[in-house]
Amino acid sequence: MNCLEFRRALLADPKAKSADLAEHRLACISCARFAEQTQAMERVLKDTLHVDVPEGLASRILLRQRLEARRQVFWRRGMWAFAATMMLSIGLAVFFPRSAPLSLEDSVLVHVEDEQRHMLAHDNVSMDAVNQGMQKYGARLVQTVGTVNFAMSCPMRKKRGFHMVLQGDHGPVTVLMMPGDFIAQRKTVADQRFRGVVMPTQNGSMAIVAENAQDLASMEQRLHSAIQFVS
């Protein structure tokens, strides 16, 4: 998927979700920002149109007319935005054939932000089920790491990997296994909400991200003893 196809899909449906969209958003910082702006505009439109209907037929008719007028205004703005995006995409394709890819650290934070809903899961995944999913990516648990709230295969920056959410003492801790995404040494990541570490493994790298520093340190130590990687 290229930038033009990504933006066209989001303009058609700002809530669209697919593996191709997720992979491109992780790899392209300009499209990641465009997605945030598009979804913010969609929320504004939704809030604008969410109005309690007054009692009475005449009031309802007037309300519908006002809403339709607002919808047309947003539609015209959306069409202008689409035209501007098309021109921008063409210009970028001419002068910058490839968008600058996100760094590994940035892609980890974007992934966690995009998949925040998984931090609310409480699936209580068994150790056997976790190992069954992890073995495709060259890893397995040799001892328990506590409660696993979520565990599933997921598209990462280079190829498909494994996404887990573990229960820390103060909140959820996200673990991303990223096969094929090799790094030379341990790195730290942070933004206004999350902090984490990315560490090298035999077949790529692994990220641990949490909102609480104590949960991060505790889970890193626990995983160091519990996960075994095989090439």
Image: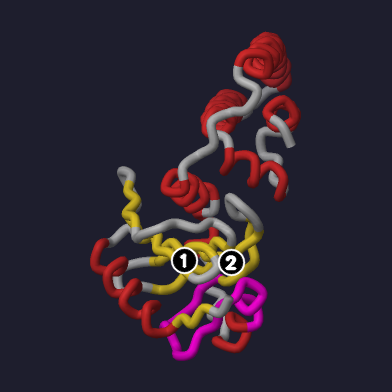
Asked whether 171 or 188 is in front, the reply is 188
How many callouts does the rendering have? 2
| Residue position marked by numbered label 1 in the rendering | 175
* Above or below: residue 213 compared with residue 149: above
**Image quadrant assignment for residue 41:** top right
Whether residue 72 is visible to the viewer of this picture, yes or no, is no
Disc 2 residue type (three-letter)? Phe
| Residue position marked by numbered label 2 in the rendering | 162
Residue 6 position in % (x across, y down):
70, 32
At x 61%, y 52%, the residue is 158
On the picture, is 162 further left or further right than 146?
right
Asked whether 133 or 183 is in front, the reply is 183
Quarter of the image with the C terminus in it: bottom right
Residue 215 position in % (x across, y down):
30, 69
Which residues make up the magenta segment? Answer: 132-150
Looking at the image, what colour scheme do you see? secondary structure
Disc 1 residue type (three-letter)? Val
On the picture, is 201 further left or further right than 89?
left
At x 34%, y 73%, the residue is 219
* Above or below: residue 218 compared with residue 60: below
* Above or below: residue 20 compared with residue 199: above
At x 67%, y 39%, the residue is 15
In contact (CB < 8 Å): disc 2 and disc 1: yes
Other residues around mark 1 within 10 Å, as few (<14) / some (14–19) / many (≥20): many
Quarter of the image with the N terminus in it: top right
Label 2 element class: strand
